[in-house]
Each structure stands twice: as structure tokens, then as C-alpha cells.
Amino acid sequence: MTTDVVEEEAHLTLPAATVEAGRLRFASPGDADQALRLGAFNLAVPEDLDVSAGLAFCRTFYQPATGGPGDRHRGHREHGHPESKLGYEDRPDQVEQLQLESFLWQRYLPDEVTAVLRRMRELTLDTLYGVFDAAGIPEEDRELVTGGARQDTGLCYTTVNHYRTGLSDRAGIVEHSDSGFITTICTDQPGYEILHEGRWTPVRERAGHFTVNLGDAFRVLTRKLPRPVTAVYHRVPELPSDADTPDRSSFTIYMGPRYDMFLYQYDTEGRLRRFQDFRAFSVEKAGKLGYEFHSRV
Ligand SMILES: [Fe+2]
């Protein structure tokens, strides 16, 4: 008689947090420590935030415009988004995406999508400040290193992703770290994996939660501090085409320095120093990962 060995893939459960009255609270001090170490955690979706308009837009933005030039639900592949330095991109992985800076949401996106994104931007800002607290970043330095996140004068944009499962032999989204401080992700199905202790590990979905990634700007800033923050390496493996399952959707809010700013780093004495021009850092990183940096930035 043979025994079937079922190898179950080890899933990771991320630490958890909520924002209450504008303040980030981790489920326990251990969750805060783990969140900084992993560079990722789950954030509860507030009860009064309905993300469905955002997910619905993930399923239409790439379709041909049907309602003429005023149709902001569709037609974003062809649109051009002349005011944006980001815009639509057909990536070499399964993802096609639309990236738009926060000051352009109202102009280019349906009103109900803009409303969801603005609410998520507030939530992401509160979360960012909570992570600054956890990492011991003095309040007086935060506006400088973010370029004025509170006044929305830093760089904040949304990324709207469509995973084209019809495209085989390529990753869902290739492994990378995010470049800024923080990214809040809303998605409708599993697939997100992180590099954990040297192994690619699938992350268990936590119902009613966003996933938050911490990025390079945080890693650089805190590298020499007692509580350094990890810029989490993450990916989505190739997603198979399945007639019963719609294509994976996700949309995110990203916050980071502007490309005309510097990245900063605390030295071992805790003094804040300029580290590198953020645009130069981004171009260098794109080169290492083998993709082209945004041509309009
Ligand atoms: Fe990412």
C-alpha cells in the first residue's frame, strides 16, 4: 500500500492592523515588529469604505470606449492621458495597468472611482504615519522625507491592474520591491507572494483587509536605525486561464517622494542625510530589473 503524500504549500499570514480615528493600531506589539521586519501587513478595510467601484473599474478600464470621449470607465488603453507622467502601460508580464497621479483622478476617472481612491489615500496616509511612529521617525522629519504627504505635495498615484490570464509563459507580475514608502493594495483574489527567509511564500488572504507593502524609500531611510524597515520583495506567479474565474483585478494607492526630490537616510548617530536623487535611484533600479523607466518622468 502506498501513502499519498500531499505537499501543502506553506502559506504565510501577515500581521494585522486597523486605522481607528485616524490612528494606526497593530493587533499587538508583536504584529508591529513583524510588519516592519516583513515590510508587509494586512490593514482592515474600514466599515464605511465600499471598494466595489474600484474593482469594477479594474474590469473595464482596458476595454474599448463605448460611450464616446466622455466615457471614463473604458478606453484607457488608447487614451494617452497627456497630463500624466505615468498613464497606461502594457507590461511584459500578465499585467496591463493604468497609473494616475492623485491630482488627475477627478479629470480622468469615473467619479465613484475617484471617491474610493480619495478615501484610500486618507487611509494610506494615516497608515504611513503609524508606520513612521513604529519605526521611530521623528514627526518633524516626516514632511521633508515625504515631500509633504499630508499636503498631497509628495507623489501619490493609483495603479489599476488587469492580469491577462490569456497570456501564458509569463509571470503574473514579476518580482520587485515598490520604490516609495507605502503601497496599499486592494485585490479580488489570491496570488500575492513575498520573499520570506529566502523562499517565495504565498500569503493567505485575510477577508476584509487590504495588503500594505513598505518600499525602498523606507528601507533606505531606516537602514541604520535600531528598527530598520524591510522593502518587501513580492510577485504574483503566472495565473492560469480559467473560464469559471474572472481575470485577477487589483488597484493600489502608492505614496513616495517626488522624482525631483532626494531619498534620505539616518546615519548611525540618527542625523538625517541626503542619500540619493530619487529619479536617479529609480532609473538605476529599473536598469537592474531590466525594464524602462517612465519615459515622461
Ligand atoms: Fe508592487
Image (cartoon, rainbow, N blue to C red):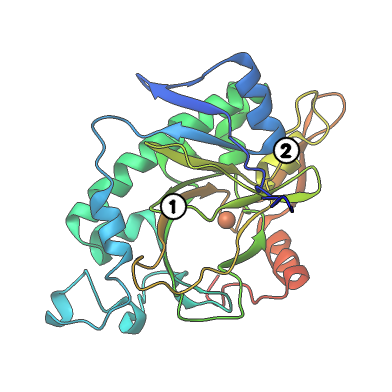
Kindly identify which residue carries mark 2. Answer: 221
> In the image, ligand 1 is in what quadrant?
bottom right
List the single residue furthest toward the right: 268
Comparing 174 with 5, the one in front is: 5
Q: Residue at x 44, y 52 (%)?
A: 252
Would residue 113 be found to the left or right of residue 210 on screen? left
The reply to whether residue 224 is in sight is yes
**Ligand 1 contact, mark 1 (Cβ < 8 Å):** yes
Tell me residue 65's x, y (percent): 21, 81
* Label 1 CA crowd tier, 10 Å (few <14, some 14–19, many 20+): many
In primary-sequence order, the first of circles 2 and 1 is 2
Q: Residue at x 59, y 58 (%)?
A: 259
Q: Secondary structure at mark 1?
A: strand
The amino acid marked with disc number 1 is Thr
Q: Residue at x 63, y 30 (%)?
A: 35
Kindly identify which residue carries mark 1. Answer: 252
